[in-house]
Protein backbone atom coordinates (compact mmCIF):
# COMPACT_ATOMS: atom_id res chain seq x y z
CA UNK A 1 0.00 0.00 0.00
CA UNK A 2 2.90 2.36 0.57
CA UNK A 3 3.78 2.08 -3.13
CA UNK A 4 0.35 3.50 -3.93
CA UNK A 5 0.92 6.58 -1.75
CA UNK A 6 4.45 7.01 -3.09
CA UNK A 7 3.02 7.02 -6.62
CA UNK A 8 0.47 9.64 -5.62
CA UNK A 9 3.09 11.95 -4.17
CA UNK A 10 5.34 11.53 -7.21
CA UNK A 11 2.45 12.15 -9.63
CA UNK A 12 2.69 8.76 -11.34
CA UNK A 13 -0.14 7.94 -13.70
CA UNK A 14 -1.12 4.50 -12.35
CA UNK A 15 -2.19 5.36 -8.79
CA UNK A 16 -3.91 8.59 -9.85
CA UNK A 17 -5.87 6.78 -12.58
CA UNK A 18 -6.95 4.18 -10.03
CA UNK A 19 -8.11 6.94 -7.67
CA UNK A 20 -10.01 8.72 -10.46
CA UNK A 21 -11.66 5.45 -11.50
CA UNK A 22 -12.66 4.79 -7.90
CA UNK A 23 -14.25 8.25 -7.65
CA UNK A 24 -16.18 7.60 -10.88
CA UNK A 25 -17.36 4.22 -9.56
CA UNK A 26 -18.50 5.79 -6.28
CA UNK A 27 -20.43 8.44 -8.24
CA UNK A 28 -22.16 5.79 -10.34
CA UNK A 29 -23.02 3.80 -7.23
CA UNK A 30 -24.43 6.94 -5.62
CA UNK A 31 -26.56 7.48 -8.73
CA UNK A 32 -28.00 3.96 -8.76
CA UNK A 33 -28.84 3.49 -5.09
CA UNK A 34 -32.45 4.22 -4.09
CA UNK A 35 -32.05 4.77 -0.33
CA UNK A 36 -30.14 7.99 0.45
CA UNK A 37 -31.32 11.18 -1.22
CA UNK A 38 -28.17 13.25 -0.50
CA UNK A 39 -26.04 10.58 -2.23
CA UNK A 40 -28.29 10.72 -5.29
CA UNK A 41 -28.14 14.52 -5.23
CA UNK A 42 -24.33 14.65 -5.30
CA UNK A 43 -23.80 11.67 -7.62
CA UNK A 44 -23.48 13.72 -10.80
CA UNK A 45 -20.89 16.12 -9.39
CA UNK A 46 -18.91 13.19 -7.95
CA UNK A 47 -18.88 11.41 -11.32
CA UNK A 48 -17.96 14.66 -13.07
CA UNK A 49 -15.05 15.34 -10.70
CA UNK A 50 -13.76 11.79 -11.23
CA UNK A 51 -14.00 12.18 -15.01
CA UNK A 52 -12.19 15.52 -15.06
CA UNK A 53 -9.52 14.11 -12.73
CA UNK A 54 -9.08 11.12 -15.06
CA UNK A 55 -8.65 13.41 -18.06
CA UNK A 56 -6.02 15.49 -16.23
CA UNK A 57 -4.20 12.45 -14.85
CA UNK A 58 -4.00 10.79 -18.26
CA UNK A 59 -1.38 13.42 -19.12
CA UNK A 60 0.90 12.48 -16.19
CA UNK A 61 4.12 10.55 -16.92
CA UNK A 62 4.23 6.79 -16.54
Image (tube, helix red, strand yellow):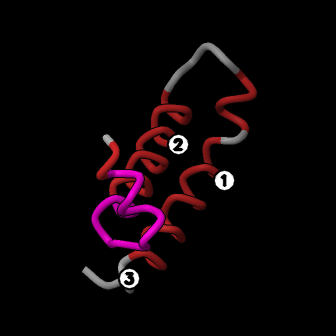
Question: Counting residues from the N terminus, which is met first, the one under dot 3 or under dot 2?
Answer: 2
Is residue 55 rendered to the left or right of residue 12?
A: right
Disc number lying in front (3 or 1): 3
Instruction: From the top left corner, tell me how far across and down residue 39 is, in percent.
Output: 66, 30
Q: Secondary structure at mark 1?
A: helix
Mark 3 is surrounded, within 10 Å at the Cα level, by few (under 14), some (14 to 19) or many (20 or more) other residues, namely few
Is residue 56 rendered to the left or right of residue 14?
A: right
Question: Counting residues from the N terminus, which is met first, the one under dot 1 or under dot 2?
Answer: 2
Location of residue 15 (image quadrant): bottom left
Q: Quadrant of the N terminus?
A: top left
- The answer to which of 60 and 1 lies nearer the viewer is 1
Disc number lying in front (3 or 2): 3
Location of residue 35 (image quadrant): top right
Q: Secondary structure at mark 3?
A: loop
Mark 2 is surrounded, within 10 Å at the Cα level, by few (under 14), some (14 to 19) or many (20 or more) other residues, namely many
Q: What is the distance, in whole Å, between disc 3 and disc 1 at their CAs? A: 23 Å
Task: Give the main secondary structure, helix, strand or loop, of the magenta stretch.
Answer: helix
Q: Which residue is mark 1?
A: 45
Which residues, given as a range, are shown in magenta?
4-17
Q: Which residue is mark 2?
A: 27
Whether the residues at callouts 1 and 2 have beta carbons within 8 Å, the answer is: yes
Amino acid sequence: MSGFFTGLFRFKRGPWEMLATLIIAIGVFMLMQPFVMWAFTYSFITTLVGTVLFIIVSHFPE
